[in-house]
Amino acid sequence: MSEQTDKFEKQLKVAGVLFMALAGFSVMMLLLLPLHYIMLQSVMETFEQIDFPKHQNRPDPRQMFQNMQPTIYLMYGLLGLFCLLFGGMSFLTGINLYRKTQRSICIIGSAAVCIWFPIGTVLGVWTLMILFDKQAQPLFEASNQLRDADFLS
């Protein structure tokens, strides 16, 4: 094994661990969503108790808060779904980078993580540079050949 190949193997393992850590951050965000929702509800309940002055030709603030409720539920649901999908994709990419398997999934995951600025952008671009290097590609092919070999015969 050449020194350059060893360098790429270490970089892929580091990238895999960093992707798994990014998945952990996504799960932490998912766990903090209910806390954030409770705090928002507390603020909205406080606003409902305030006696706002009535202005002609202006909407009632209490009515505005009540009209916003379905949108708030939708936004929290979408944010939770995004955290789940993003965390799962980051974890899957990290596992595949660490094991040097399924290069196409690693490329898709590395490109997708670039939307999480700035941490994901740096990690995604760095990982894509490794994945598209001509000297790193054989690492994935060797791993696939080893996985496809029949050890029982």
Image (tube, grey):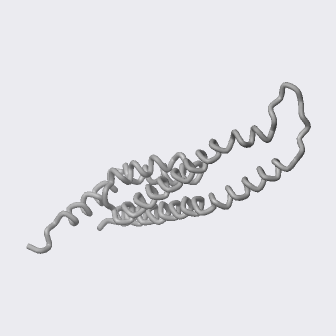
Q: Residue furthest bottom?
A: 152
Location of the N terminus by quadrant is bottom left
Query: 6 or 92: which is nearer to us?
Result: 92
What residue sits 69% from the left and 41% below the top? 68
Residue sticking out furthest to the left? 153
Q: Is residue 57 left or right of residue 142?
A: right
Instruction: Tally the numbered discs.
Output: 0
Judging depth in this view, the residue of 28 and 125 nearest the camera is 28
Which residue is at a point 42% across and 51% down the rendered structure image?
A: 109
Snapshot quadrant of residue 11: bottom left
Residue 129 visible: no
Does residue 59 sit above or below 92 in this rendering?
above
Residue 113 in the image: state x and y as whole percent.
49, 50
State the image coordinates of residue 110 (x, y, percent, origin top left): 44, 51
Q: Could you tell me which residue is drawn at 39 percent across and 64 percent down?
A: 95
Between residues 86 and 98, which one lies in front from this camera angle?
86
Give how far across and how far down residue 148 sits, in percent.
18, 63
The quadrant the C terminus occupies is bottom left
- The reply to whether residue 104 is visible in this rendering is yes
Provide residue 18's location: percent of width, then percent of height: 50, 63
**Apparent side of residue 139 relative to residue 120 in the rendered image (left or right):** left
Image-based side of 12 in relation to 81, left or right: left
